Amino acid sequence: MSMALWQNLPLLMIVGALMCAAVSSVLKAKAARAVMLGLSILECAGMITLLYFTVSLGESFVFPMGEIGAPFGNELRVGPAEALVGALLALVMLLAVVGGFQQLKRDVRENRTPLYAAVYCLLFAAMVAMTFTNDLFTAYVFIEISTIAACALISARGHGQHIFAAARYMIMNLLGSGLFLLGLSMLYSLTGHLLFPQLGAAVRQLILENRYSMPLYLSFLLMTMGVAIKSALYPFHTWLPSAYSNSTAASSAILSSVVSKMYIFLLIKIFLRAEGTAVFARRIDDVLFLFAMVGIIAGSLHAIVQRHVLRMVAYSSVAQIGYIFLGLALGTREGVAATVFHILAHSAAKSMLFLAGNELRSVSGQNDTFPALRGAAKKAPVAGLAFLVGACSLVGVPLLGGFSSKVFLAQAGIGIGGWRMYVVLAEIVLSTALNVAYMLRAALNLYRDGETDAKEKPASNWPLNAAVSLLMALTVFLGVCGSTVMDWIQKGIALFV
Amino acid sequence: MKKQKPDFFSAFHAWLEYGGSSLDREMTESLENKPETGTVESKNKPKSKKKTPPQNNPRRAYADAWWYRLLALAVAAAMIWLLAEAVARMPQFGNADTLADSELTEFYVEHTKEETGAMNIVTGIILDYRGFDTLGESHVLFIAVCTVLLMLSIYGEKDEETRLKRNEMERHFEPGDDVILQSAARLLTPLIFVYGIYIILNGHLSPGGGFSGGAVLGAGLILYQNAFGYEKIERFFTYKTFKWVSVCSLLFYSLAKGYHFFTGANHMDSHISTGVPGNILSGGLLLPLNFVVGCVVACTMYALFTMFRKGEF
């Protein structure tokens, strides 16, 4: 079977990003930044092309990496769900760099910028590869790349607290990668396969014959725990606040909306494609359900008491990751689809909040405590509006992405019935109330009269304004056309098995 | 203000705010008091209303508490027990009958030689069948170096003057000439280099390949640097050499593998012949790929060493 021309795009995107990384590391700062932007634009275009073709054809395709395909070589697989998640994450990465551009120039020294650009390009390659890979070990290789890349992004500003945050991130995330690798190698020695379709068949066979059941379940448990640590599910979230809140705007937006989300999408693929129903049968989903429940409430409580707005936004990520795992823990198709939608909605809203929040912090003299931020929205009106829209989306105001995702989650919860239905619904209501308490408090604080010195008006930051405007449009799009997007997701998930 | 014992609520509030990390709290508050740009006027400073008395800081206490350590031990013990249990129930290593599906291994053993031209099956697998993983893996090395450079490199200093000053200062602390080390290195370094190159070039024929040969070359570079110092090694290996060698190797790797994947997936003729298995010039792309991987690994090892050693990079 020969490939259509557009079906070569995944390969071009990954190899192109790797080559841009190598090239940008020896360029001058200005050229390196141009490479970052150019690569992001091209990758976005590629992702959107893939999305268009896969959705309009309604099918997925497999791209063998080499002459010899499955099950002996590596493979990529692209379907509507992969293309959709990939497109949104690529768009968020592009907008994060555009929006954080001026701050990037200020925060990262000239002679460090080429390395920052190289790391960014490698992270892009890792994101694309992890979204599209059909092979468990390839996923691990790119998990390694993205873990190291994230450390570099956190520590790029090079002050004490950033190095500290990066070190803590490194320790926790290496633990996560280690668990994932343990689980993966156990699974390989049990099944003898690494590609998802063959792996899934072998696992189903093992379950049927009831052989090696204990190591089999343990291997999936280890991989789930690895991903849970790396994406900051509640009790494993301790690395998150300092990592997200201190780094430069582009880094925080990328870390919060892209890096943690791609691990979760990988976990979804492992759940659905590598073993079908095995995990759900052994109550791993019950454990995830409990963690998610606790995480949603505890993350919100942590967020409420914060005195720093960006730390508050970071802690709200913990709660939102809880939501994402909640959909996964429901154990139904609808639940997984709701999870994917929440990944999209949260990525759009959270990157917007971090970009806007960083801008508001810099117009208030690098101080992001609540009193200092009073009236900041008047100094940077677009950033203020973006913060408000992002906050409303996370709270779940209708017509915004967060609302649709909460509706889908509630529908999935109703779908499972029983006592868990009531728990899910009660949880959504309670956490919405908590969200209002901290998110809207912060957003409205921005519009209060502050002690503004009206004489010096900060120069408007047009790349940021453009980026957050696009993100606002994206959030509204996800809210208004939620059901269309959901259609694509469900189409993609139906093709998973 | 009168000191008082924190009630349960304020302790809980304090725990919520920094999630049990006293370091986190110190870092955040030092940031608050000393903003980076240094332009904040005092009127903008937050007046923190809630002050937790430091001597009764619940966060400090709990990492040292006996129950915390006991809990950590218990979790570790449970984990060890679980893993040991699982290993005991896993298929016996090396026993083909116990594997659920040995299709993959059989295929590799039977086909690798004729399809890739590699006598060494491992090289055939990592550079051909699973070449994409290895492409990613060499970029792991690259990103590791980039990240360490980003954090530690003297090229990250504010300006050229500071960099030169730091370079000067750090070289001042380099150990002096050591006769024993130098005599040994004079004897060993050429052998090490030759052996490393041998391992790389014979990667597709005998055990070895880019990763192991590169590590040997890197060790040779490190030995030479230790014995003779920076002046000598800079005659042939500087920061610039390092940069260009790694970048060119990685670019060649990406291009070659990209071409290979592209032709493979589209079922086009790649015009790369595998030659006669067993000859040194055989295996198609395997030999050049091994060579560039070797370069990347050697550069990475040397760069990481010098970065932690001080000087030059």
Image (cartoon, rainbow, N blue to C red):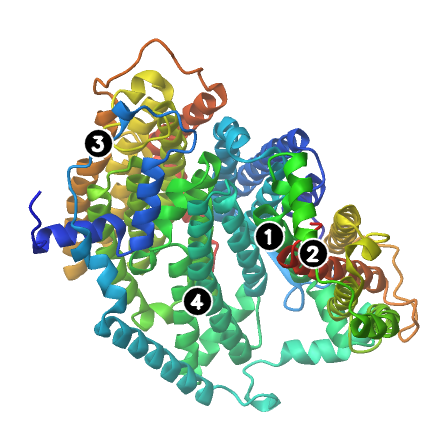
Nearest to the eye among marks 4 and 2: give it.
Answer: 2
Nearest to the eye among marks 3 and 4: give it.
Answer: 3
Image coordinates of residue A451 in percent, x first then y, are: 24, 17
Q: Quadrant of the N terminus of chain B?
A: top left
Q: CA distance from mark 3 to mark 1?
A: 40 Å
Secondary element at tag 1: helix
Image coordinates of residue A388 in percent, x first then y, are: 29, 27
Horizontal relation, residue A228 to residue A192: left or right: left
Amino acid identity at mark 4: Met
Return the chain for callout 1. B
How crowded is the residue under tag 2: few (<14 C-alpha within 10 Å), some, or many (20+)?
Answer: many
Q: Which residue is mark 1?
A: B148
Q: Which residue is mark 3?
A: A440
The answer to whether residue A260 is above or below residue A394 is below
Whether discs 2 and 1 lie on one chain: the answer is yes
Q: Nearer the viewer, residue A391 or B20?
A: B20
- Residue A379: name its quadrant: top left
Q: CA distance from mark 4 to mark 2?
A: 33 Å
Q: Which residue is mark 4?
A: A223
How crowded is the residue under tag 3: few (<14 C-alpha within 10 Å), some, or many (20+)?
Answer: many
Secondary element at tag 3: helix
Q: Are marks 4 and 2 in contact (CB under 8 Å)?
A: no
Mark nearer the N terminus (2 vs 1) = 1
- Rendered residue at 45%/35% (across/down): A249
Horizontal relation, residue A270 to residue B52: left or right: right
Q: Which residue is mark 2?
A: B303
Secondary element at tag 2: helix
Secondary element at tag 4: helix
Image coordinates of residue A290 in percent, x first then y, are: 24, 62
Amino acid identity at mark 2: Ala
The answer to whether residue B94 is above or below residue A184 is below
